[in-house]
Protein backbone atom coordinates (compact mmCIF):
# COMPACT_ATOMS: atom_id res chain seq x y z
CA UNK A 1 0.00 0.00 0.00
CA UNK A 2 2.91 2.33 0.84
CA UNK A 3 4.50 1.72 -2.59
CA UNK A 4 1.16 2.42 -4.27
CA UNK A 5 0.87 5.83 -2.54
CA UNK A 6 4.46 6.74 -3.44
CA UNK A 7 3.87 5.91 -7.13
CA UNK A 8 0.65 7.91 -7.25
CA UNK A 9 2.51 10.86 -5.72
CA UNK A 10 5.30 10.57 -8.32
CA UNK A 11 2.76 10.46 -11.15
CA UNK A 12 1.04 13.52 -9.73
CA UNK A 13 4.34 15.41 -9.67
CA UNK A 14 5.04 14.51 -13.30
CA UNK A 15 1.52 15.49 -14.26
CA UNK A 16 1.80 18.87 -12.53
CA UNK A 17 5.19 19.57 -14.07
CA UNK A 18 3.98 19.01 -17.61
CA UNK A 19 0.47 20.43 -17.44
CA UNK A 20 1.23 22.90 -20.27
CA UNK A 21 3.22 20.56 -22.51
CA UNK A 22 2.08 20.03 -26.07
CA UNK A 23 2.16 16.47 -27.32
CA UNK A 24 3.83 15.33 -30.54
CA UNK A 25 2.83 12.29 -32.60
CA UNK A 26 3.45 10.96 -36.08
CA UNK A 27 0.50 11.84 -38.32
CA UNK A 28 1.62 10.28 -41.62
CA UNK A 29 4.56 8.23 -42.82
CA UNK A 30 6.56 5.30 -41.52
CA UNK A 31 9.99 6.93 -41.51
CA UNK A 32 11.08 4.97 -44.58
CA UNK A 33 11.06 6.16 -48.19
CA UNK A 34 8.50 4.55 -50.45
CA UNK A 35 5.24 4.90 -52.32
CA UNK A 36 2.57 2.84 -50.67
CA UNK A 37 -0.38 2.97 -48.32
CA UNK A 38 -3.24 4.66 -50.18
CA UNK A 39 -6.55 3.54 -48.72
CA UNK A 40 -5.07 2.70 -45.32
CA UNK A 41 -3.98 4.50 -42.16
CA UNK A 42 -1.64 7.41 -42.92
CA UNK A 43 0.78 6.20 -40.26
CA UNK A 44 1.24 2.98 -42.21
CA UNK A 45 1.86 4.76 -45.52
CA UNK A 46 5.31 5.44 -46.93
CA UNK A 47 6.23 8.88 -48.27
CA UNK A 48 9.23 10.01 -50.27
CA UNK A 49 10.59 13.42 -49.28
CA UNK A 50 7.37 15.07 -47.98
CA UNK A 51 8.54 18.67 -48.32
CA UNK A 52 5.21 20.52 -48.14
CA UNK A 53 2.10 20.34 -45.98
CA UNK A 54 -1.16 22.33 -45.93
CA UNK A 55 -4.60 22.09 -44.34
CA UNK A 56 -8.03 23.12 -45.55
CA UNK A 57 -11.04 24.48 -43.68
CA UNK A 58 -12.32 20.98 -42.93
CA UNK A 59 -9.06 19.86 -41.33
CA UNK A 60 -7.84 17.68 -44.20
CA UNK A 61 -4.06 17.53 -44.39
CA UNK A 62 -2.39 17.70 -47.81
CA UNK A 63 1.17 16.48 -48.37
CA UNK A 64 3.50 17.32 -51.25
CA UNK A 65 5.02 13.88 -51.78
CA UNK A 66 7.98 15.06 -53.85
CA UNK A 67 9.63 11.97 -55.32
CA UNK A 68 6.28 10.21 -55.71
CA UNK A 69 5.03 13.11 -57.89
CA UNK A 70 1.74 13.27 -56.02
CA UNK A 71 -0.26 15.39 -53.60
CA UNK A 72 -1.65 13.10 -50.93
CA UNK A 73 -4.40 13.85 -48.46
CA UNK A 74 -5.27 12.55 -44.99
CA UNK A 75 -8.90 12.55 -43.86
CA UNK A 76 -8.95 13.74 -40.22
CA UNK A 77 -12.10 11.77 -39.43
CA UNK A 78 -10.60 8.40 -40.35
CA UNK A 79 -6.84 8.91 -40.61
CA UNK A 80 -6.94 7.33 -44.07
CA UNK A 81 -4.50 8.56 -46.71
CA UNK A 82 -5.16 8.76 -50.45
CA UNK A 83 -3.82 10.50 -53.54
CA UNK A 84 -5.49 13.85 -54.21
CA UNK A 85 -3.54 14.96 -57.30
CA UNK A 86 -0.92 13.51 -59.61
CA UNK A 87 -0.73 10.26 -61.51
CA UNK A 88 2.78 9.45 -60.32
CA UNK A 89 4.45 10.71 -63.50
CA UNK A 90 6.98 13.54 -62.85
CA UNK A 91 5.87 15.65 -65.80
CA UNK A 92 3.79 18.76 -66.37
CA UNK A 93 0.65 17.48 -68.03
CA UNK A 94 -3.11 17.56 -67.67
CA UNK A 95 -3.86 21.30 -67.63
CA UNK A 96 -7.58 21.91 -67.96
CA UNK A 97 -8.49 18.46 -66.69
CA UNK A 98 -8.89 16.70 -63.35
CA UNK A 99 -5.86 17.03 -61.08
CA UNK A 100 -6.08 13.35 -60.19
CA UNK A 101 -5.16 12.44 -63.77
CA UNK A 102 -2.44 15.07 -64.26
CA UNK A 103 1.28 14.60 -64.27
CA UNK A 104 2.91 16.74 -61.59
CA UNK A 105 6.62 17.45 -61.83
CA UNK A 106 8.07 16.96 -58.34
CA UNK A 107 5.63 18.92 -56.13
CA UNK A 108 7.64 20.48 -53.33
CA UNK A 109 5.41 23.15 -51.74
CA UNK A 110 1.66 23.30 -51.34
CA UNK A 111 -0.70 25.93 -49.94
CA UNK A 112 -4.47 26.51 -49.87
CA UNK A 113 -6.22 29.88 -50.03
CA UNK A 114 -9.32 30.96 -48.11
CA UNK A 115 -11.58 29.89 -50.97
CA UNK A 116 -10.23 26.32 -50.97
CA UNK A 117 -8.05 26.60 -54.08
CA UNK A 118 -4.74 24.76 -53.91
CA UNK A 119 -1.40 26.00 -55.27
CA UNK A 120 1.56 23.73 -55.89
CA UNK A 121 5.17 24.67 -56.60
CA UNK A 122 6.46 22.04 -59.00
CA UNK A 123 10.22 21.77 -58.77
CA UNK A 124 12.61 20.84 -61.55
CA UNK A 125 15.14 19.44 -59.13
CA UNK A 126 16.56 16.03 -59.82
CA UNK A 127 18.11 15.92 -56.36
CA UNK A 128 16.71 18.16 -53.60
CA UNK A 129 19.86 17.82 -51.50
CA UNK A 130 22.51 18.80 -54.07
CA UNK A 131 20.27 21.15 -56.09
CA UNK A 132 20.97 19.60 -59.48
CA UNK A 133 18.63 20.97 -62.11
CA UNK A 134 17.26 19.74 -65.38
CA UNK A 135 17.04 22.22 -68.25
CA UNK A 136 13.50 23.39 -67.60
CA UNK A 137 12.41 25.89 -64.95
CA UNK A 138 9.75 25.59 -62.29
CA UNK A 139 6.01 26.09 -62.41
CA UNK A 140 3.21 27.00 -60.04
CA UNK A 141 -0.01 25.16 -60.65
CA UNK A 142 -3.49 25.71 -59.28
CA UNK A 143 -6.18 23.18 -58.45
CA UNK A 144 -9.55 24.89 -58.13
CA UNK A 145 -12.41 23.77 -55.91
CA UNK A 146 -13.81 21.68 -58.79
CA UNK A 147 -10.55 19.69 -58.94
CA UNK A 148 -9.33 21.16 -62.24
CA UNK A 149 -5.60 21.84 -62.59
CA UNK A 150 -3.97 24.68 -64.53
CA UNK A 151 -0.54 26.32 -64.72
CA UNK A 152 -0.62 29.89 -63.39
CA UNK A 153 3.10 30.79 -63.26
CA UNK A 154 6.38 29.81 -64.86
CA UNK A 155 7.59 29.73 -68.47
CA UNK A 156 9.98 26.80 -68.40
CA UNK A 157 13.13 28.86 -67.82
CA UNK A 158 15.06 29.92 -64.74
CA UNK A 159 15.42 33.56 -65.87
CA UNK A 160 13.88 36.49 -64.04
CA UNK A 161 12.10 38.52 -66.70
CA UNK A 162 10.98 41.57 -64.77
CA UNK A 163 8.00 43.00 -62.94
CA UNK A 164 4.52 43.87 -64.12
CA UNK A 165 4.33 40.91 -66.50
CA UNK A 166 2.01 37.88 -66.56
CA UNK A 167 3.27 35.28 -64.09
CA UNK A 168 3.25 32.71 -66.90
CA UNK A 169 6.04 34.75 -68.56
CA UNK A 170 8.33 34.61 -65.52
CA UNK A 171 11.10 32.09 -64.95
CA UNK A 172 11.63 30.58 -61.50
CA UNK A 173 14.78 29.20 -59.95
CA UNK A 174 14.47 27.06 -56.83
CA UNK A 175 11.22 28.22 -55.24
CA UNK A 176 11.52 28.03 -51.45
CA UNK A 177 7.91 28.63 -50.43
CA UNK A 178 4.46 29.79 -51.54
CA UNK A 179 1.66 31.32 -49.48
CA UNK A 180 -1.73 32.93 -50.21
CA UNK A 181 -3.00 35.99 -48.35
CA UNK A 182 -6.58 36.99 -47.47
CA UNK A 183 -6.95 39.09 -50.64
CA UNK A 184 -6.21 36.33 -53.12
CA UNK A 185 -2.57 37.22 -53.80
CA UNK A 186 0.03 34.46 -54.00
CA UNK A 187 3.54 35.09 -52.65
CA UNK A 188 6.67 33.21 -53.72
CA UNK A 189 10.03 33.04 -51.95
CA UNK A 190 13.08 31.86 -53.86
CA UNK A 191 16.79 31.23 -53.60
CA UNK A 192 17.50 34.14 -55.95
CA UNK A 193 16.71 36.41 -53.03
CA UNK A 194 13.35 37.76 -54.03
CA UNK A 195 9.94 37.80 -52.44
CA UNK A 196 7.45 38.02 -55.31
CA UNK A 197 3.69 38.47 -55.50
CA UNK A 198 1.19 37.26 -58.09
CA UNK A 199 -1.98 39.31 -57.81
CA UNK A 200 -5.46 38.02 -58.49
CA UNK A 201 -5.13 39.16 -62.12
CA UNK A 202 -2.06 36.98 -62.68
CA UNK A 203 0.52 39.79 -62.77
CA UNK A 204 3.81 39.24 -60.94
CA UNK A 205 5.88 41.86 -59.09
CA UNK A 206 8.81 41.87 -56.67
CA UNK A 207 7.87 42.81 -53.11
CA UNK A 208 11.35 42.60 -51.56
CA UNK A 209 14.84 41.77 -52.75
CA UNK A 210 17.05 42.79 -55.65
CA UNK A 211 18.10 39.34 -56.78
CA UNK A 212 21.52 39.81 -55.16
CA UNK A 213 22.45 38.10 -51.92
CA UNK A 214 23.08 40.35 -48.93
CA UNK A 215 21.40 42.26 -46.15
CA UNK A 216 20.19 45.84 -46.22
CA UNK A 217 17.14 48.04 -46.12
CA UNK A 218 15.68 47.90 -42.62
CA UNK A 219 13.58 50.97 -41.98
CA UNK A 220 13.05 51.68 -45.67
CA UNK A 221 10.96 50.41 -48.57
CA UNK A 222 11.02 46.62 -48.90
CA UNK A 223 11.33 47.01 -52.67
CA UNK A 224 14.82 48.48 -52.17
CA UNK A 225 15.98 46.00 -49.51
CA UNK A 226 18.42 43.16 -49.97
CA UNK A 227 17.40 39.70 -48.76
CA UNK A 228 19.09 36.31 -48.95
CA UNK A 229 17.23 33.07 -49.63
CA UNK A 230 13.56 33.73 -48.80
CA UNK A 231 11.84 30.79 -47.11
CA UNK A 232 8.63 30.77 -45.03
CA UNK A 233 5.94 33.42 -45.57
CA UNK A 234 2.97 34.38 -43.37
CA UNK A 235 0.43 37.21 -43.06
CA UNK A 236 -1.57 38.80 -40.29
CA UNK A 237 -5.04 40.31 -40.67
CA UNK A 238 -3.67 43.86 -40.76
CA UNK A 239 -1.89 43.34 -44.06
CA UNK A 240 1.61 42.83 -42.66
CA UNK A 241 3.88 40.26 -44.31
CA UNK A 242 6.37 38.15 -42.37
CA UNK A 243 9.07 36.02 -43.98
CA UNK A 244 12.18 34.03 -43.19
CA UNK A 245 15.29 35.73 -44.55
CA UNK A 246 17.10 32.44 -44.11
CA UNK A 247 20.54 33.35 -45.37
CA UNK A 248 20.61 36.31 -42.99
CA UNK A 249 19.31 34.29 -39.99
CA UNK A 250 16.44 36.72 -39.58
CA UNK A 251 12.66 36.95 -39.48
CA UNK A 252 11.63 40.13 -41.24
CA UNK A 253 8.37 42.06 -41.47
CA UNK A 254 6.95 44.25 -44.22
CA UNK A 255 4.21 46.45 -42.86
CA UNK A 256 1.11 47.55 -44.73
CA UNK A 257 3.00 50.67 -45.92
CA UNK A 258 5.74 48.55 -47.51
CA UNK A 259 8.44 49.30 -44.89
CA UNK A 260 10.73 46.40 -43.96
CA UNK A 261 12.32 45.65 -40.58
CA UNK A 262 13.91 42.74 -38.73
CA UNK A 263 11.87 41.32 -35.85
CA UNK A 264 14.15 38.40 -34.90
CA UNK A 265 17.76 37.37 -35.39
CA UNK A 266 20.84 39.01 -36.83
CA UNK A 267 23.37 38.07 -39.47
CA UNK A 268 25.18 35.71 -37.08
CA UNK A 269 23.80 32.24 -36.53
CA UNK A 270 23.24 30.66 -33.13
CA UNK A 271 20.69 29.82 -30.48
CA UNK A 272 19.51 31.97 -27.58
CA UNK A 273 16.61 33.93 -26.21
CA UNK A 274 13.88 31.50 -25.17
CA UNK A 275 11.54 33.10 -22.68
CA UNK A 276 12.67 36.62 -23.53
CA UNK A 277 12.06 39.29 -26.16
CA UNK A 278 12.45 38.01 -29.70
CA UNK A 279 14.57 41.03 -30.61
CA UNK A 280 17.36 39.63 -28.41
CA UNK A 281 17.18 36.05 -29.72
CA UNK A 282 19.57 34.25 -32.03
CA UNK A 283 18.29 31.83 -34.65
CA UNK A 284 19.95 29.59 -37.21
CA UNK A 285 18.62 29.46 -40.76
CA UNK A 286 14.86 29.99 -40.26
CA UNK A 287 12.76 28.25 -42.89
CA UNK A 288 9.05 27.27 -42.68
CA UNK A 289 6.56 29.68 -41.12
CA UNK A 290 2.90 29.81 -40.10
CA UNK A 291 0.74 32.25 -38.15
CA UNK A 292 -2.36 31.62 -36.07
CA UNK A 293 -5.42 33.87 -35.77
CA UNK A 294 -4.03 35.45 -32.60
CA UNK A 295 -0.93 36.71 -34.40
CA UNK A 296 1.51 34.17 -32.98
CA UNK A 297 4.24 33.17 -35.44
CA UNK A 298 5.60 29.63 -35.60
CA UNK A 299 8.79 28.96 -37.54
CA UNK A 300 11.29 26.21 -38.17
CA UNK A 301 14.67 27.15 -36.71
CA UNK A 302 16.11 24.67 -39.16
CA UNK A 303 19.75 24.33 -38.15
CA UNK A 304 18.83 24.32 -34.45
CA UNK A 305 16.32 21.50 -35.11
CA UNK A 306 13.55 23.42 -33.36
CA UNK A 307 10.08 24.79 -33.96
CA UNK A 308 9.91 28.14 -32.18
CA UNK A 309 7.07 30.52 -31.43
CA UNK A 310 7.05 34.32 -31.46
CA UNK A 311 4.03 35.36 -29.43
CA UNK A 312 1.95 38.36 -30.43
CA UNK A 313 3.57 40.09 -27.44
CA UNK A 314 7.06 39.50 -28.85
CA UNK A 315 8.27 36.67 -26.62
CA UNK A 316 10.11 33.72 -28.18
CA UNK A 317 9.83 30.14 -26.92
CA UNK A 318 10.43 26.61 -28.20
CA UNK A 319 7.38 24.55 -29.20
CA UNK A 320 9.01 21.40 -30.54
CA UNK A 321 12.47 19.89 -30.74
CA UNK A 322 15.36 19.46 -28.30
CA UNK A 323 18.18 20.83 -30.52
CA UNK A 324 19.39 17.39 -31.61
CA UNK A 325 18.39 16.01 -34.99
CA UNK A 326 16.80 12.60 -35.22
CA UNK A 327 13.48 11.00 -34.38
CA UNK A 328 12.10 10.49 -30.89
CA UNK A 329 9.38 11.57 -28.53
CA UNK A 330 6.09 10.41 -30.03
CA UNK A 331 3.38 10.50 -27.38
CA UNK A 332 5.36 12.88 -25.19
CA UNK A 333 6.06 16.61 -24.84
CA UNK A 334 6.95 18.15 -28.20
CA UNK A 335 9.75 20.25 -26.72
CA UNK A 336 11.52 17.07 -25.59
CA UNK A 337 11.25 15.31 -28.95
CA UNK A 338 13.80 15.07 -31.75
CA UNK A 339 12.86 16.49 -35.14
CA UNK A 340 14.88 16.63 -38.34
CA UNK A 341 14.71 19.11 -41.26
CA UNK A 342 11.21 20.61 -40.99
CA UNK A 343 10.62 22.38 -44.32
CA UNK A 344 6.94 23.27 -43.98
CA UNK A 345 4.45 24.03 -41.20
CA UNK A 346 0.64 24.11 -41.36
CA UNK A 347 -2.02 24.87 -38.77
CA UNK A 348 -5.54 23.44 -38.82
CA UNK A 349 -8.72 25.06 -37.54
CA UNK A 350 -7.93 23.87 -34.00
CA UNK A 351 -4.35 25.25 -34.21
CA UNK A 352 -2.87 21.78 -34.25
CA UNK A 353 0.47 22.05 -36.02
CA UNK A 354 1.65 19.75 -38.83
CA UNK A 355 5.37 19.50 -39.57
CA UNK A 356 6.76 18.30 -42.89
CA UNK A 357 9.82 16.58 -41.46
CA UNK A 358 11.66 15.52 -44.61
CA UNK A 359 14.62 14.26 -42.60
CA UNK A 360 12.37 11.69 -40.97
CA UNK A 361 10.21 11.06 -44.07
CA UNK A 362 7.01 11.82 -42.19
CA UNK A 363 4.44 14.38 -41.12
CA UNK A 364 4.28 14.96 -37.39
CA UNK A 365 1.52 16.68 -35.44
CA UNK A 366 1.92 18.90 -32.39
CA UNK A 367 -1.40 18.91 -30.58
CA UNK A 368 -2.53 22.43 -29.63
CA UNK A 369 -4.66 21.52 -26.63
CA UNK A 370 -3.02 18.39 -25.27
CA UNK A 371 -1.35 18.77 -21.92
CA UNK A 372 1.11 16.78 -19.89
CA UNK A 373 -1.87 15.70 -17.79
CA UNK A 374 -2.71 13.31 -20.62
CA UNK A 375 0.84 12.09 -21.11
CA UNK A 376 3.17 12.68 -18.15
CA UNK A 377 6.82 13.14 -19.04
CA UNK A 378 8.44 9.98 -17.74
CA UNK A 379 10.91 7.78 -19.60
CA UNK A 380 9.70 5.65 -22.48
CA UNK A 381 10.61 1.99 -22.47
CA UNK A 382 11.38 -0.17 -25.46
CA UNK A 383 8.45 -2.52 -25.06
CA UNK A 384 6.28 -3.86 -27.83
CA UNK A 385 2.87 -2.47 -28.67
CA UNK A 386 0.06 -2.32 -26.15
CA UNK A 387 -2.26 -5.28 -26.51
CA UNK A 388 -5.60 -3.90 -27.76
CA UNK A 389 -8.16 -6.54 -28.70
CA UNK A 390 -9.99 -6.39 -31.04
CA UNK A 391 -8.50 -3.58 -33.08
CA UNK A 392 -10.24 -2.24 -35.20
CA UNK A 393 -13.34 -2.31 -32.98
CA UNK A 394 -16.67 -0.58 -32.47
CA UNK A 395 -15.64 1.18 -29.27
CA UNK A 396 -15.56 -1.84 -26.99
CA UNK A 397 -12.24 -3.58 -26.49
CA UNK A 398 -9.77 -4.82 -23.90
CA UNK A 399 -6.18 -3.80 -23.38
CA UNK A 400 -3.18 -4.98 -21.41
CA UNK A 401 0.51 -4.23 -21.23
CA UNK A 402 2.95 -6.64 -22.91
CA UNK A 403 4.30 -7.46 -19.44
CA UNK A 404 2.71 -8.18 -16.08
CA UNK A 405 2.30 -5.43 -13.49
CA UNK A 406 0.17 -5.19 -10.38
CA UNK A 407 1.11 -1.54 -9.91
CA UNK A 408 -1.28 1.30 -10.85
CA UNK A 409 -1.45 2.42 -14.47
CA UNK A 410 -2.86 5.75 -15.63
CA UNK A 411 -4.77 5.45 -18.93
CA UNK A 412 -5.99 8.22 -21.23
CA UNK A 413 -7.77 8.00 -24.57
CA UNK A 414 -7.79 11.03 -26.87
CA UNK A 415 -8.79 11.84 -30.43
CA UNK A 416 -6.42 13.01 -33.17
CA UNK A 417 -6.96 16.63 -32.10
CA UNK A 418 -5.80 15.82 -28.57
CA UNK A 419 -9.25 16.14 -26.98
CA UNK A 420 -9.63 13.85 -23.99
CA UNK A 421 -12.22 11.09 -24.51
CA UNK A 422 -11.70 8.95 -21.43
CA UNK A 423 -9.34 8.80 -18.44
CA UNK A 424 -9.00 6.21 -15.68
CA UNK A 425 -6.54 4.34 -13.47
CA UNK A 426 -6.24 0.57 -13.43
CA UNK A 427 -3.78 -2.28 -12.99
CA UNK A 428 -2.79 -4.43 -15.92
CA UNK A 429 -1.72 -7.75 -14.57
CA UNK A 430 -4.91 -8.77 -16.35
CA UNK A 431 -6.91 -7.57 -19.34
CA UNK A 432 -8.89 -4.38 -18.75
CA UNK A 433 -12.24 -3.99 -20.58
CA UNK A 434 -12.90 -0.53 -22.02
CA UNK A 435 -15.93 1.04 -23.68
CA UNK A 436 -15.93 4.48 -25.26
CA UNK A 437 -18.65 6.34 -27.12
CA UNK A 438 -16.94 7.92 -30.11
CA UNK A 439 -17.51 8.22 -33.86
CA UNK A 440 -15.44 6.15 -36.32
CA UNK A 441 -11.82 7.23 -36.63
CA UNK A 442 -8.36 6.94 -35.09
CA UNK A 443 -7.82 7.46 -31.36
CA UNK A 444 -4.77 7.25 -29.11
CA UNK A 445 -4.58 5.14 -25.93
CA UNK A 446 -1.72 6.09 -23.62
CA UNK A 447 -0.72 4.12 -20.54
CA UNK A 448 1.66 5.37 -17.83
CA UNK A 449 3.05 2.97 -15.25
CA UNK A 450 6.20 2.65 -13.16
CA UNK A 451 7.84 1.12 -16.26
CA UNK A 452 7.24 4.12 -18.51
CA UNK A 453 4.83 5.54 -21.05
CA UNK A 454 3.39 3.82 -24.11
CA UNK A 455 0.97 5.06 -26.78
CA UNK A 456 -0.86 3.07 -29.42
CA UNK A 457 -3.65 3.67 -31.91
CA UNK A 458 -7.25 2.50 -31.63
CA UNK A 459 -9.24 2.16 -34.84
CA UNK A 460 -13.00 2.53 -34.39
CA UNK A 461 -15.17 1.54 -37.34
Image: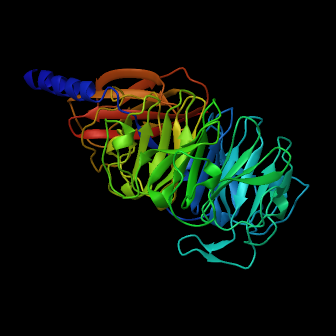
Residue located at (25% from left, 40% from top): 452
- The picture quadrant where one finds residue 448 is top left
Instruction: Say if residue 45 shows up in the picture.
Output: no
Rendered location of residue 140, percent (x, y): 76, 58
Rendered location of residue 235, percent (x, y): 61, 38
In the rendered structure, the answer to whether residue 111 lies left or right of residue 171 reads left
Give the residue furthest to the right. 96
Instruction: Say if 89 sits above or below 404 in the image.
Output: below
Q: Nearer the viewer, residue 206 or 11?
A: 206
Give the residue furthest to the front. 220
Instruction: Say if residue 87 shows up in the picture.
Output: yes
Which quadrant: the N terminus? top left
Residue located at (79% from left, 71% from top): 156
In the rendered structure, the answer to whether residue 299 lies left or right of residue 440 reads left
Figure disc tally: 0
Rendered location of residue 408, percent (x, y): 23, 27
In the rendered structure, the answer to whether residue 85 lies left or right of residue 95 reads left
Instruction: Say if 410 sits above or below 49 in the image.
Output: above
Residue located at (70% from left, 58% from top): 121
Give the residue furthest to the left. 2
Which quadrant: the C terminus? top right
Residue located at (22% from left, 23% from top): 12
Rendered location of residue 148, percent (x, y): 86, 49
Q: Nearer the viewer, residue 95 or 210?
A: 210
- The picture quadrant where one finds residue 5 is top left
Q: How are the colours assigned in the image?
A: rainbow
- The picture quadrant where one finds residue 174 is bottom right
Amino acid sequence: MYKFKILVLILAIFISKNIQAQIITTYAGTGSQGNAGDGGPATDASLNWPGGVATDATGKVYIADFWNARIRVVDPATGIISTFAGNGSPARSGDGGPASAAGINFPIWVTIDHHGNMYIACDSLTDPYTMHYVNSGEYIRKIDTAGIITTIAGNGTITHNGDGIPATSEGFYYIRSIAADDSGNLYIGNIKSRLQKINKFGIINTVAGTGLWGFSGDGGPASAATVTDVHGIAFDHSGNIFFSDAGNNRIRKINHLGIINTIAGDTSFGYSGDGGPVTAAKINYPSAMAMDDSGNIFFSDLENYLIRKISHTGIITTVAGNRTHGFSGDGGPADSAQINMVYAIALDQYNNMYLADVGNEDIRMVCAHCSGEAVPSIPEKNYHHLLITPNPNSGTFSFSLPYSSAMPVQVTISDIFGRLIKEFTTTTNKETPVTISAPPGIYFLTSVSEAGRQTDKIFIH
